[in-house]
């Protein structure tokens, strides 16, 4: 009888130690938060929009007017490779989703260019 009780107590202690180790280790193995991933993608999108800005500037220098659209079809000859949307990994397009280009041509060589960030705000290309 004493032997059975001793084995049961040892098994219970081993189980408690295993649970304690698992609980402590679980805190250290947390996945990155969505916020950190979105911040990294925001930084990538800001870098990608600079490639588009370079293409718009080259188009303006060549044609003395702002391009009608900031797209692969219009600026592809000036920007190669075309930048990718960090959220979809597809080529960047004009739109309203994170990683999409925001573009509006102005009079003559004026234009506004930006990119939609994770929180829906628009980062204007400097």
Image (tube, rainbow, N blue to C red):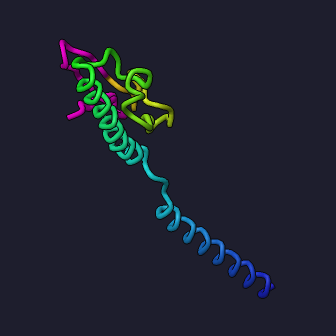
Q: Give the residue displayed 25% in from the left and 16% down from the top.
A: 105
Q: Determine whether 20 is above or below 4 in the image.
A: above
Place of residue 63 in the rendered image (x, y in percent of width and height, measured from the top left): 26, 20
Q: Give the residue displayed 30% in from the left and 21% down from the top.
A: 103
Q: Is residue 49 left or right of residue 72?
A: left
Q: Determine whether 83 is above or below 27 in the image.
A: above
First to last magenta residue range: 103-126
* Quadrant location, the C terminus: top left
Q: Is residue 98 left or right of residue 21?
A: left
Residue furthest out toward the front: 62
In this view of the protein, which residue sits in the foreground, 86 or 104?
104
Q: Is residue 111 left or right of residue 118?
A: left
In this view of the protein, which residue sits in the foreground, 33 or 107?
107
Q: Give the residue displayed 37% in from the left and 34% down from the top.
A: 118
Place of residue 123 in the rendered image (x, y in percent of width and height, measured from the top left): 26, 32
Residue furthest out toward the bottom: 3
Can residue 83 be seen at all in this image of the molecule? no
Place of residue 101 in the rendered image (x, y in percent of width and height, measured from the top left): 36, 26
Q: Determine whether 106 is above or below 3 in the image.
A: above
Residue 19 located within the stretch drawn in magenta: no
In this view of the protein, which residue sits in the foreground, 4 or 14?
14
Q: Determine whether 24 is above or below 95 in the image.
A: below
Quadrant in which residue 111 is drawn: top left
Place of residue 109 in the rendered image (x, y in percent of width and height, measured from the top left): 19, 19
Residue 106 located within the stretch drawn in magenta: yes
Quadrant in which residue 21 is drawn: bottom right
Q: Give the residue displayed 50% in from the left and 67% down from the top.
A: 24
* Quadrant location, the N terminus: bottom right
């Amino acid at each position: 009888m004493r032997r059975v009780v001793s084995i049961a107590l040892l098994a219970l202690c081993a189980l408690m130690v295993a649970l304690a180790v698992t609980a402590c280790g679980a805190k250290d193995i947390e996945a990155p938060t969505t916020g950190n991933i979105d911040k990294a993608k925001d930084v990538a999108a800001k870098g990608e929009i600079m490639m588009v800005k370079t293409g718009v500037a080259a188009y303006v220098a060549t044609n003395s007017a702002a391009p009608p659209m900031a797209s692969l079809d219009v600026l592809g000859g000036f920007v190669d490779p075309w930048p990718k949307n960090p959220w979809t990994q597809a080529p960047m397009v004009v739109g309203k989703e994170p990683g999409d280009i925001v573009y509006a041509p102005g009079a003559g060589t004026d234009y506004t260019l930006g990119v939609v960030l994770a929180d829906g705000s628009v980062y204007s290309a400097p």
